[in-house]
Every structure is written in structure tokens, then in C-alpha cells.
Image (tube, rainbow, N blue to C red):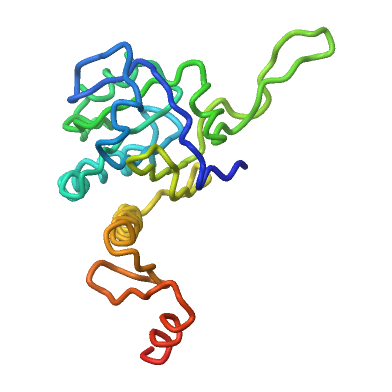
Amino acid sequence: MSVLVGKKAPLFSAEAVVDGGEIVENFSLSQYIGKKHVVLFFYPADFTFVCPTEIIAFQDRIKEFEDRNVAVIGVSVDSAFSHWKWLQTEKNDGGIKGVKYPLVADNSMTISMNYDVLAGEFDYDDEGNEIFKGTPMAYRGLFLIDKDGIVRHQVVNDMPLGRSIDEALRVIDALQFFEEHGEVCPADWHKGDEALKPTHEGIAQYLSKH
């Protein structure tokens, strides 16, 4: 598994469904560079079980991300039409109707490969034919990308394990606090908690209080 933290986030341009129903052909990550932080998250597939709980959970708290000037983007290897169909399906029928943030179609699986969250890989058989080994879906990867396009945080869960929206927001708050104040955030830091200066004196003062 690649560690992308500290590196430029792999850019992409692909079909996506935005605003809950509009299919756009060239949705690009680069449109946010210099303007917003981005939470880019991958999920295995449309019309599954854990995935809608995460996708809807992000939507339920989307204002908290918007208030922090953070764009939320979902990605799976499904087609844009599959995304669109799922977005038109009522929640009581297993759908995600009401989700407004972009869902990107990674049909070629190249975005998932570039972020190294694809649960398998392309290979060749003994006759030289290209085959896919593993599961052609993405693990539950989440990447926090800053305004300069640098990955500052990543977490990757196996497919049965849903992610924490609270933790995503906590890490955003920590990053933005550091960007604004230059102070670093200790273990289990939450917005409003004391941070510390990145010096020996700073850590000594902090530890003496805790």
C-alpha cells in the first residue's frame, strides 16, 4: 500500500454525477486546487450494504464540511449511470437519494490504482492475455488533500469496515488549526483543545499539564 501523505494527490478527470442527478463528463480534482481542502473517499460499489451508510452519513453532515471550506467527493469503479440510478433510488429501497456531493465514475479503475486502493491488480496469464487478479473494487480509502493539492492524511479500511465521519472532521480541524496557528495537535485533539508549540519547551509544558 502506497503512502501518499506529503505527496501531490494524483489528479484525474472523469465522468461524475453532481447535485444528485447531473452527469458531467470531465469532472476534475484540479478545480479545487488553491480554493478548497478536499476529502476524497473511495468505496467498493453502488447498491451494496456498508457503502450507503457512509455515503448518506457524509451527506447528513455535509454542512460541517462546507463550513470548513472542504469539498467531499466519492469514488467507485461503477459507471456514471450506475451512480445516477442509485441516486434516484429511495433510501427505503436501498438507494441514496438526496446525496448532492459528486460521485466519480472510475470505470477504468485508474483512479483507484493511482491512489493504491484497488483490491487487486492487472496481470497476464500464461498465454499473454491480460487478466485481473483479486477484486475489481476499491477498498474504503479516504484522503484529505490541502489547497496546494498535497495529501495530508490517509486511511484505508477493508471493505466490511465503515469509516468515522467524526474522525474525518477531527483531522480536518487539526490540519486547519495547524495551518492557521502553526501549533501542532497532540493525541485525541479536538477543536477547542489546547495544542502545543513544536519545540522541546512546548511539549514539556503540555505534558506537565496532562
Image point 25% across, 14% down: which residue?
23
Quarter-of-image position of residue 144 = top left
101 versus 204 height, above or below: above
Position of 160 compared to 54: left or right? right
Residue in front for this viewpoint, 63 or 130: 63
* Residue 75 image point, x, y percent: 39, 29
* Residue 72 image point, x, y percent: 28, 38
Image point 39% across, 84% down: which residue?
206
Quarter-of-image position of residue 128 = top right
27 versus 36 height, above or below: above
Viewport quadrant of the N terminus: top right
Position of 154 compared to 98: left or right? right
Viewport quadrant of the C terminus: bottom left
* Residue 71 image point, x, y percent: 26, 38
Quarter-of-image position of residue 171 = bottom left
* Residue 164 image point, x, y percent: 36, 54
Image point 27% across, 20% down: which residue?
17
Residue in front for this viewpoint, 33 or 106: 33
153 versus 30 height, above or below: below
Residue in front for this viewpoint, 32 or 127: 32
Q: Residue furthest right?
A: 126
